[in-house]
Image (spheres, rainbow, N blue to C red):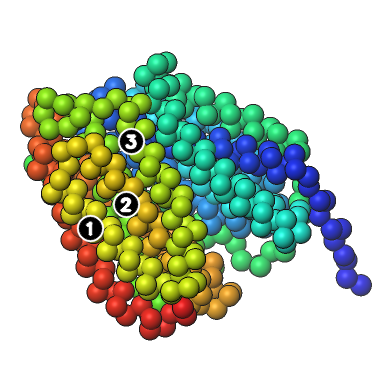
Amino acid sequence: MTATLAPPVRIGKAAVGALGMLAVATGALESVVTPTLPLLQRELDMSPAEGALLSIVLLITGALVTPVAGKLGDRYGGKRVLIRLMAVVCAGGLVSSVAPNLPVLLLGQILQGAMVGALPLSFILVRKHLPAGESKVAIGVVSGLFVGGGMAGTLSAGPVAEGLSRHWMFALPTIAVIGATLLVNRLMPHDPPGRSDGTGIDWPGLLLLSGTLITLMLVLALAPDVAAQPLVLVALVVVLAAFATGWIAVERRAASPMVDLGMLARPAVWKSCVLTFVICVGTSVAVYLIPQLFAVDSDAYGFGASATAIGFFLLPGAVAASLAGPIGGVGARRLGSRAVVTAGIVLMVTALIALAAVHTEIWHLVVGKAAIALANGLCVTAMVTSTATSVDQSDTGIATSLVLVTRVLGYAVGAQLSGALLTAATPSGSDVPAESAFVTGFVIAGAVTALSLLVTRTMSKGVKE
């Protein structure tokens, strides 16, 4: 006889609302660093390279946590894993709120990175407890509220940091996350564990990939000071090579690898990964450099913008990014992924080169940032669609995980290279880098992004439009 599981308990609007509140709170907590990064660099005496590391460490943690969270959710139940992940996020927010220096703040951001794995778990819970039609609506609501929370965090972080302190800009959204988590725990029924596929989590691969990414960031952060500490940099490069080699060896032999490197042999997948990496490098250069340029003193070549003003200036870019997903999805369905990616790349290259040539007015940066955010959203949406439809259904998760890892690498490399450029171009005793560093960063990002057009020309081969 086969045992039958009782159908999941249907949830009401209150439970979906609790998930929505959690999405708003986590979106706000995730977004507070970007508009206040120049302020944090001043208060914590960080170099631009160290600021770049702070801006991406949450994303790196999220990329590592997300696939593990999905497997643990299937094994132990989505609600159980979600609540525990949010406990880690809350701990990270509290650590960030009391951080007296950069190392402690980095620790807080690493813990906060668990929130990236929480959103997919929310979707799993909604799908388990609602019919298909209603679950799509609920997922759309939760996704929209997460984007809205990010916009709210972008706008409010500066006023809170300047009116109260940088500690409160982490503490207030963390308090909101704690309250929303308690509501979810109370209102969301437990879901039964799913069937295990018989494979465990690739812990060795996860640890080695973590070491590879962290060491890579340290190498890029220390690169501008190579003359002062060459032996340290050489040692880190050796450690990086060891981590990367070990990770590749483990992933090739693992029964259920975190990242199936064999999938890269497929043309559609490696093209998607190359394009995703390059596009994210270009995007992250702009994401890092533009707030820094806003903050440069107006007596030099910048605008002397406060954290509050920077958040306001970045808002159009956040709106453009939120619109890019739906637009990219419709465009990929009607015109094909190749057309959407090509259009996005051309728009991004144009915006980056324009910023390198003209950045003397605030609106130049606002429009350029919005164009780059829109282009990035169009490209990423089309690439995910292209990747998901180019492989068998059973391989969708493996293929998209490769794209996720390359996306994180692209953002990390772009941000760290930008920080290294500014650090190298900052004279001793000054905190204002040479204007040429910004121009160089935008030009390099535009040139690298333009090279990806060579790959888009062959996208139709092996890709189901």
Tag 3 or tag 2, which sits nearer the N-term? 3
Tell which residue pokes out farthest to the right in this image.
1
User: Disc 3 designates what residue?
Assistant: 313
Provide residue 66's location: percent of width, then percent of height. Answer: 52, 53
Q: Element at badge 3? A: helix
User: Decide: marks 1, 2 in contact (CB < 8 A)?
Assistant: yes
Mark 2 → mark 3, Cα distance in angstroms: 13 Å
Category of crowding for the residue at label 3, using alpha-carbon neighbours closer than 10 angstroms: few (below 14), some (14–19), many (at least 20): many
Nearest the camera: 159 or 108? 159
Task: Name the quadrant containing residue 124.
Answer: bottom right
Provide residue 44's location: percent of width, then percent of height. Answer: 29, 24
Amino acid identity at mark 1: Thr
Q: Element at badge 2? A: helix
Q: Which residue is drawn at 32% across and 69% down?
A: 342
User: Disc 1 designates what residue?
Assistant: 350
Q: Element at badge 1? A: helix
Q: Relative to residue 423, is residue 330 depicted above or below?
A: below
For residue 172, side relative to residue 10 (left or right) = left
